[in-house]
Image (cartoon, rainbow, N blue to C red):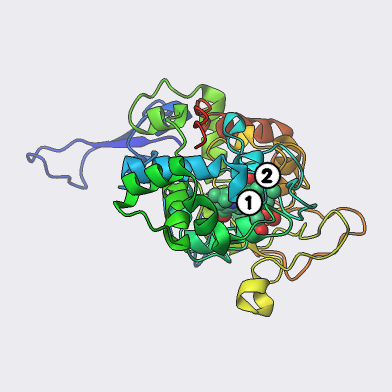
Amino acid sequence: MALAAIIVYSCSKGKATTEGPTIVVPTPEETLRQQYSKSVTQWPAATWYNNIQIRELAALPQNPSKDKAELIALGKALFFDPRTGNGMKTCASCHHPDTYWIDQKTTADGIAVHHRNTPSMENVWQLEGKLFHDGRAKTYREQIAEAINSPIEMGGNATALPAKLQIIPGYLRLYEAAYSIQTMTVEELLDAIAAYSRSISSGETAFDRFIKGDYQALNDVQIEGLHLFRTKGKCINCHNGPFFTDLDFHNLGYAVTSKGALDNGRFEVTGLETDKGKFRTPGLRNVVHTAPYLHNGSIASLSELINLLSQGMPQKTGQQINGTLSPHIKNVRLSSKEQENILAFLESLSSEPTKTERPVLP
Ligand code: HEC
Ligand code: HEC
């Protein structure tokens, strides 16, 4: 956008008059890099659909968790211990710490075949109230008990855990350090796993350095991608805030399991017809490392997904949309060059994988 400076010659000090020549001097056009090398509030306007709560992108916030180290240590042991379930799977079998807390499978491989893709554990502290792809778990207790008890995940029995762990001296010591008592309760064991879950964060990314003022942290292609993400691509309408998610639920189609059955998504929680086929907007930090994509892992790569998104998510041949496609998923016609730029921007949202020492099990 060319900025034009209007210079008005005037005899009276500082006051414009209608007399005299008016000379319009065009200033050199600002490059996209210059337009973005400013604080977020001065970035070019994003393109918002009507009735969207406007929320800009932001740097990674500090993890607000105040859980004490002893509680986290107890939770960590339980996270890596097959005895938390029926002896076969641990939380870490699916949420694998070396691969950004996922299993890299289309759908999770538990005691039995799962119909959903394993999400990362990073930054789950911000999901309390809407855990799982459909947001059905309001609390960590609910979510963790479900993982332990689920016959397709860990096939265990959460209520039987205190009796089982109470007789293991090492667990008794960890428990006493966390709670200063020796009599275990299921709630407190679940809370310890919750504390460990909440402690897992993603790290600082090139995007974070950029938005905090290190304007060399993104290259030109990534800045183009950031701009397209906020404007022509309309991605920011749903992927916004510090984690690139509005934490709301939308229908992008593709709500079918690998066996062809429909997945009702959010509808299972609310019973509202309008929620059929809706899933929670996933955050995009480290998304380049967590293929395959969507709640069912049905899209293998980011380039494939960006290509589909830029055409308004055309469905696979013979695949019917369960419910109604979001009105904000439109054919935004991104060229292949523009799609590559958005991909380069998503790459700038990645941080080093966490290095997690396995706990010594009691
Ligand atoms: C068999 C693989 C598997 C195991 C074992 C497993 N999970 Fe998960 N986890 C998943 C899948 C799949 C989902 C998504 C399920 C859904 O949305 O219906 C999930 C969802 C979650 C979520 C919600 C994340 C989000 O984005 O909403 C958290 C937190 C979580 N698991 C923690 C745990 C913990 C803690 C344990 C151990 C007690 C555990 N998981 C065991 C596969 C697994
Ligand atoms: C209407 C809201 C909306 C818009 C607009 C939107 N997304 Fe999404 N996005 C979602 C939802 C919801 C999902 C999860 C859908 C599912 O699991 O079935 C998703 C999934 C994704 C995923 C997969 C993440 C994962 O972990 O599986 C990526 C990557 C993504 N979107 C990027 C983009 C980009 C890039 C744009 C712009 C070109 C965009 N999105 C536009 C709501 C939106």
Position of residue 233 measured from the top left corner of the image (x, y, whole percent)? 61, 46
**Extreme residue in the left direction:** 13
Secondary structure under badge 1? loop
What residue is pinned by disc 2? 89
**Extreme residue in the right direction:** 318
Position of residue 171 measured from the top left corner of the image (x, y, whole percent)? 45, 44
Image marks 1 and 2: residues in contact by CB distance under 8 Å:
yes
Q: Taking 257 as reference, is 270 above or below it?
A: below
Task: Decide if residue 330 is in sight here.
Answer: no
Secondary structure under badge 2? loop
Position of residue 331 measured from the top left corner of the image (x, y, whole percent)? 72, 53
Q: Taking 200 as reference, is 234 above or below it?
A: below
Q: Nearer the viewer, residue 29 or 128?
A: 128
Q: Taking 330 as reference, is 243 above or below it?
A: above
Q: CA distance from mark 1 to mark 2?
A: 6 Å
Q: Is mark 1 within 8 Å of ligand 1?
A: yes
Q: Amino acid at mark 2?
A: Lys
Q: Amino acid at mark 1?
A: Gly
Specify whether 79 is left or right of 110: left
Q: Is mark 2 within 8 Å of ligand 1?
A: yes
Q: Quadrant of residue 284?
A: top right
What residue is pinned by disc 1? 85
